[in-house]
Amino acid sequence: MTRDCLVFQTGDNSLRPHILHPPARPTPLAPSARIGYDSGMEPNPCPPLQRPLRYYLISLGCPKNLVDSERMAGLLQERGHQLVGQIESADLAVINTCGFIADARTESHDAIAEMVERKRRGLLRNVVVTGCLAQRDREALLAQYPEIDHVLGVFARDHIAAAVDRLSLPLVDQQAEFLPAPIRPLPDTQRLRLTPPHLAYLKISEGCNRTCSFCSIPLMRGPYASKPIEMVVEEARELVAGGAIELILVAQDTSFYGIDLYGRPSLSQLLDRLESIERLRWIRLMYLYPQHIDDRLVERLAACGKVLPYLDLPLQHINDDILAAMRRRVTRADTERLLDRLRTRIERLVLRTTMLVGFPGETERQFEELVQFVEQQRFQRLGVFAFCPEPGTPAAELDNPVPEPVKQERCRRLQEVQQKIAYAWSEAQVGQSCDVILDSPVPDNPDSFVGRSWADAPEIDGAVYVTGESLRAGQIVPCQIVMARQYDLIAIPLADAESPPDRPAITAQKPRKTRSPTARDQRKGANRRRSS
């Protein structure tokens, strides 16, 4: 049976496949642009290429991992290897793994096992494993799957072409490459884009300096390292030259950007530079930590320029004792002051957050405090996770674990509270106007498109369905919202509306695949993406 290559992307509480758009050819760069800033590490020389190989790419995990996958695909394309859309056509599989949480590790192991089984049956020649799980469990992976030909850690990413070239040789031994975190993040230029042409993720840093007791990211990605502003701007210009009109800034902690490099939070200065890029229309910020959101950043968000009034601000909890046990270094009072400041100064602000329930020692009273906080704050977007102990983290050693049935019940209860809030917000949008960016036509209905408003981040939020004449994917259309459908909205172009509203249009965001509201509620935190 022929099988399309898919990409699976995990955002907050998501596990949803979609077919990848045909990738655009990466912008040619000078050879010097292909070496990391001050990294001290140049990819190993490639051996003589015996013949180009056809590879099938599975990218698992967050958008930051997707950027790594696009970078590897660009390097492989430059070397002459061909990305294929069906596993049946491939000589080898490249699996960029996620190791963040248990569900993600299970997805990674499932993907590896599937490709290894194909190799055992003679249906696939080689298997290469990269990414966070490879970095975290390298010895175990090599022992568990002797059929793996090559394992690359996260900081050996740019050695992918040399590794695949070696697989074209007649005899290849199992190999692994792992490098320490570079002084500066590796460049993310020369990518083979796997997103729709009008959308791109822009990674502004690597690693994390936070010591949250439940998080394993620093164990895999190392300490925080900001890219220099000039480096980020160069990458942004390349993405825009390749057709992107919307850039989504991602990092482990976006609001920490620049502190390690310039001695102070510098996200607002970076945004000033990105605002000046012609043809770039929207900038969306993801993964901001509550600390280091200074007045200058708030003013930039309030200026109604290219930066959307949308913030992804994972809070995790609100009870002070739980926050202290999580090592979040913020209090409830700090959080409430920040939320009040943001909402007072930024018009039509949409806030997305995530909450972690069932943390060790969480009492029913502490959970009810969280529920009441969510009811009071009425976040437009909120994802809920049940705590899962991560090996090697301090939280995994804490006493008083919450029983699994209790964790799942609390997760369900908080999701039900948020569902009512989200539905009410959708209903309140009816009659309003906003800009909508069109992602793709609705199947079997070429006059209807799936799009998104300023309130919708790719993969994890709702959709806006627009019907009209002469529409096309990637187009920004001023629309009037005429109906709400749970998490999603129905709209018509303002030109077709009988009486256009007075409210000015607000910029919108990237496209996403349709999904049922029930599935959205039940999405888990793992993430899986396959290439096409």
Image (cartoon, grey):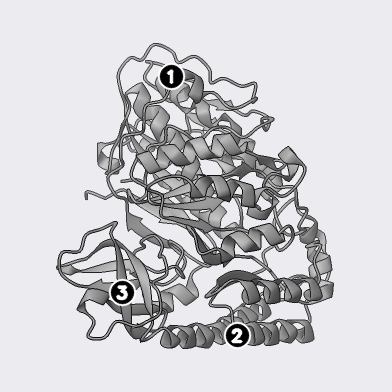
Q: Earlier in the sequence, mark 1 or mark 2?
A: 1
- The kind of secondary structure element at disc 2 is helix
> In the image shown, does 46 or 33 lie closer to the viewer?
33
Sequence-wise first label, 3 or 1? 1
Q: Is residue 145 left or right of residue 510?
A: right
Q: Earlier in the sequence, mark 2 or mark 3?
A: 2
Q: Which residue is mark 1?
A: 166
Residue 530 shows in this picture: yes
Kindly report the distance in space between the C-alpha atoms of the residues bearing marks 3 and 1.
Answer: 53 Å
Q: How many marks?
A: 3
- Front residue of this view, candidates 122 and 458: 458
Q: Is residue 62 visible?
A: no
**Left or right: residue 153 compared with residue 20:** right
Residue on which the image places disc 3: 479
- Identify the residue at the far top of this view: 48
In the image, farthest residue toward the front:
502
Tell me the residue at 69%/87% (across/down).
Answer: 372
Cα separation, mark 1 vs mark 2, equals 52 Å
Measuring from the top left, give residue 495's x and y in whole percent: 22, 75
User: Considering the numbered disc 3 on the image, is that residue within a helix, a strand or a loop?
Assistant: strand
Q: Quadrant of residue 237?
A: top left
Quarter of the image for residue 439 reads bottom left
The amino acid at mark 1 is Arg
Badge 2 local density, few (<14 within 10 Å), some, or many (20+)? some
Indicate the secondary structure of the residue bearing disc 1: helix
What label does residue 413 carry, if any? 2
Residues at marks 2 and 3, CA–CA distance in whole angstroms? 35 Å
